[in-house]
Amino acid sequence: MPAYVSDTIVAAATPPGKGGIGIVRISGPAAAELAEQMLGAVPQPRYATNVTISDPAGGELDHGIALYFPGTASYTGEPVLELHGHGGPVVVASVIDAAIALGARRAGPGEFSQRAFLNGKLDLAQAEAVADLIDSGTSQAARAALRSLSGSFSAVVASLQQQLIDLRLHVEAAIDFPEQEIDFLSDAALLAKIDACEAAFASLQRETRIGRVLRDGLQLVIVGQPNAGKSSLLNLLSGQDAAIVTEVAGTTRDILRERIEIDGLAVELVDTAGLRDDPDRIEAEGIRRAREALKKTDGVLWIQDASSAGDESLDEEIPPAVTVIILRNKIDLTGEAPGPSAEDPQTLNVSAKTGAGIDALRESIRKLAGYKDLGEGAFTARRRHVAAIAAAAAHFERGREALRNERAGELFAEDLRLAHTALGEVTGEFTSDDLLARIFSTFCIGK
């Protein structure tokens, strides 16, 4: 991609407020000129230089350190000047104002990273990993974001793209000879490449699902009849009295959210109003919100009262695609053994009062997230990555079916092209300006 030529931008690269150090970042064609005017000279490239920072009239603003990165040897791919001074809000603001007076403009959210992308210093997945690393909620998520930033995710996508290119070349080369009768399904080399692509898609989709959970965390909605122990379970897992617990049915009337961490996996627990048929007016609104939460969740903790023989069937309330972990609570009253139920190994016997069976629940949550098989090669992924890869896989499968059922090589070739294009959206090879604007608008200013 050709160098991105634009105006010169400036912003604080450190958070607002008081601190020991405040960093002002300047990027653009006029960075060297601003260095001469604010510092008296352009610092030696890539060396920390002790400087006095001045305003356009020559008045001293601060004493600190300057770093200058010329041309393509910078983060953004254009000349960059970083001024490291004292971290007072007034000092930082005065340095920024001086740069603006000399011709720079304030940077928008994520504009430095956007320039790095447009100048070919980072692909889009790496640029997004910058924000993910900053926003990481757990150490595991931070390590995964760092691997994405280093290019691990992009490398896997690029490898699959190359497999698709090889497959397209094979198919289209055969199509180019229409005078010959071609039986694609008897071509062992072609079938081997198709199988390899299918396996690669399956692996990438599995890894991106885990990566999405690492970035966003896993959301679990706790549902069940009133007084089944939903709020007690929330309090036990979170380690605090986040929800009010009483013997009165309908105590929980709104959505309660609490974040916990399980071996580096961020989990958001959503406690909901008990689902029943005759609630009062306020509780009915809580039940409505509970049902809305079920449509967006990654999984459901369905709490049943093991000490009650009542009908607790909630099948019609839970979307078919959502994984359900069934918990038979209050085994402290029934005397049942904790952990997997003898009648149904998929059901766990627990006690939110004593904590019995909770270790088995944590293991089930890790398994639900795919976290049990997480290795050191994991990377973060966003929902748009998951959607783009799913679209690419769907095009690939549709083309494969056309080849298998109709022996239509032309249709297969077109779907391979569409799959390749969809994969390109992950790294920004094929990306609309609107999508770029949405992505970088979520970044912090100065990054």
Image (cartoon, grey):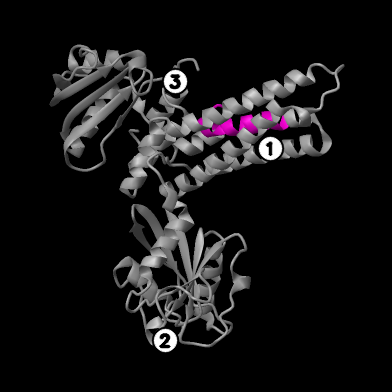
Q: Earlier in the sequence, mark 1 or mark 3?
A: 3
Mark linked to residue 334 = 2
Q: Earlier in the sequence, mark 1 or mark 2?
A: 2
Image vertical order of residue 96 relative to residue 283, above or below: above
Image spot of residue 189 (x, y percent): 68, 26
Residue type of the residue flagged with mark 1? His
Residues under labels 3 and 2: Cα distance? 66 Å
Nearest to the observer: residue 380 or residue 182: 182
The secondary structure type at the circle numbered 3 is loop
Mark linked to residue 373 = none
Mark linked to residue 395 = 1
The secondary structure type at the circle numbered 2 is helix
Graded by Cα atoms within 10 Å as few (under 14), some (14 to 19) or many (20 or more), the crowding at tag 2 reads few
Comparing labels 3 and 2, the label whose residue is closer to the camera: 2
Comparing labels 1 and 2, the label whose residue is closer to the camera: 2
Most frequent secondary structure within the magenta stretch: helix
**Res 227 → quadrant:** bottom left
The secondary structure type at the circle numbered 1 is helix
**Residue found 60% across the figure and 42% down from its top:** 390
- State yes or no: discs 1 and 2 in contact (Cβ < 8 Å): no
The magenta-colored residue range is 414-433
Asked if residue 444 shows in the view, the reply is no
Nearest to the observer: residue 197 or residue 6: 197
Graded by Cα atoms within 10 Å as few (under 14), some (14 to 19) or many (20 or more), the crowding at tag 1 reads many
**Res 375 → quadrant:** top left
Residue type of the residue flagged with mark 2? Thr
Image vertical order of residue 303 relative to residue 200, above or below: below
Residues under labels 1 and 3: Cα distance? 31 Å
**Residue found 41% across the figure and 22% down from its top:** 121
Query: Residue tagged by mark 3?
Result: 119
